[in-house]
Image (cartoon, rainbow, N blue to C red):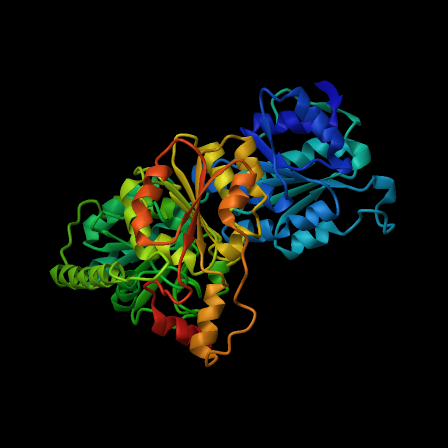
Amino acid sequence: MEEIKLSEALVRGLINSGIKRVYGIIGTTVLNFYDALYEYKNEIKQIIVRHEGVAISAADAEYRTTRRPAAAVVHAGGGFLNSLTGLGIAMKDRSRLLLISGSVKKRLKDTDSWLEINQEAISKALGLKHYYIDEPEKFYGIFNEAINNLFYGLPMPVVLEVPEDLWNKKIYIEENFPMLTKGSQEINKDDIIRVKEEIKKSKRPLILVSGEVNYKDAREYVYKLSEIVDGYVITTGNSRGLCEEDNYRCLGRVGYGGGSLLADKVLKETDYLLVLGNEYNDITTYGYNLTPHNSIVVISLDPSSEIRPSYYESIKADPLEFLKNLVKELENEKLKNEDWEKEISNYKNDWEKIINETLKRKYDNEVNPAKFFYELNKILPRNRIIIGGQGTHILYAYDYIKVFEFGGFIAATNLGSMGFALPASIGAKIANPDREVVAIAGDGEALMSIQSLQTIKDENLNIKIIVVNDNSYRVLYLKQVINKSGRVYGTVLNNPDFVKLAESFNIKGIKVNNDNDIDNALKEIKKDEAILIDLIVSKEDLPPTNTDMVLKMDQV
């Protein structure tokens, strides 16, 4: 046993847990924690950001691209409140991160004191695990439970709140802490056998992989299963990269906000859909308007899969372990579905024709974004990481840029919140310095987190930033044009000069406003330095999307 300050114990606990970074902003309620971080700056790095939401999304991105949790630290009150959108994104997309929050002095708790808000109630309203250290001697047990929940509980942010006057209290700790104890769950053999027999009868088998199963070692088993049953694989936004998008078994992302017409078509036509993970939801199915007519089986440990409309059979199990067991049961089988293969080939050809047609579009004093992203896809290394936020611009990242490796694509998929791309690119690049990171943001979104450019510069991060600039909130602009008889209101924007704005942060900026500038822009992107491309596009440009389903989703 050793007696040290609580602040130092927390830092050592993070290091012992394998957490390599803390993203955050200093404040009076966490000043003493920063003092402890100073003592261990060679073992755990502190990344300075300029907004608490940036800290959360950077930590979120580190986990999603590596499956290693990171930490963030915020000041009590306003600092904590600034983190909420990032926490909501991480919660909805099931990302693990530890948020360390300061708190008012313990003796002032519940007195409506300066900086005081009910952080625990807010955390729990988001469905998060929240831990409050009310006594120094309880730190060891509370931290141990929090870390175990971080690593092995339902994938979700975990919040640890520490009163300002407890940081310097002395406590006793053991040398090797925390004690990480992963539980195990048995897979019901009867469920495996039943799914095995059902999928063998299928003539159009389809596997939908979700973020819950998106781990490096899952790819091998997903491929094996698809080969055995002669089926195909579609993904959600949170599972891109699980299968290589140039593999003929991999048909890309399905559903609202970026799904291809190819993936949507096979979802509708399958006669047996095996869903690995929790994301058979309203996004995947356009509000449950696009669903197969036959069997749907969802394998998930996430409680959300049990509360959605009961259009499917739900099996409570770890989807990756279930997959491994199912492959083992089927390993001596070799099924053939030639008609399904022919149908898929026709759907692929139809989708390719649509993509090729968009490349022919011409605009005056504006770029054809389809052509830009199509060409960008060609020059990026295979291990690229694409970061998207939310808006029409993200459709280009789905339609024209392919993903090939684990962690190769992340976005604010399930909350649909803007402002994610730039902050997330920070965590993705810091955690993956040898991978090319490209942040794709709309003009409206970029201005919600533009302060991220300072951290990108401070940390010397070679991030490629594409601002798709249409001077509008285009999703809503197009909805007003289509659904509201052209009554455009509140969706047309005035923007700053993004090139000059980037240059004010000492980051290179280039404006691209016609197709002839594309080649030069791509040459600049290939250079070993951060760059911001101000891509001037028409607000009337509509990337390929399932317009019928989108309209139906809006109306129902």
Taking 511 as reference, is 160 left or right? right
Q: Report if residue 76 is visible in the image.
A: yes
Which residue is at 38% across, 36% downward? 436
Q: Report if residue 183 is visible in the image.
A: no
Q: Considering depth in this image, is 483 or 344 the residue closer to the camera?
A: 483
Estimate the x, y position of residue 504 in percent, counting from the top left.
Answer: 56, 40
With respect to residue 233, does 35 lie above or below?
above
Which residue is at 58% across, 27% downward? 45
Which residue is at 61% across, 46% downward? 53
Estimate the x, y position of residue 506 in percent, counting from the top left.
Answer: 53, 35
Estimate the x, y position of residue 281 in percent, counting from the top left.
Answer: 43, 63
Taking 93 as reference, is 516 left or right? left
Q: Considering depth in this image, is 442 or 255 the residue closer to the camera?
A: 442
With respect to residue 31, does 152 lie above or below?
below
Taking 543 as reference, is 388 left or right? right
With respect to residue 97, does 90 lie above or below?
below
Farthest residue, direction front: 365
Farthest residue, direction bottom: 485
Which residue is at 15% across, 54% downward? 335
Q: Considering depth in this image, is 361 or 275 the residue closer to the camera?
A: 361
| Number of numbered discs visible in the structure rendering | 0
Q: Quadrant of the N terminus?
A: top right
| Among the 4 quarters of the image, the one containing residue 532 | top left
Taking 215 as reference, is 26 left or right? right
Q: Quadrant of the C terminus?
A: bottom left
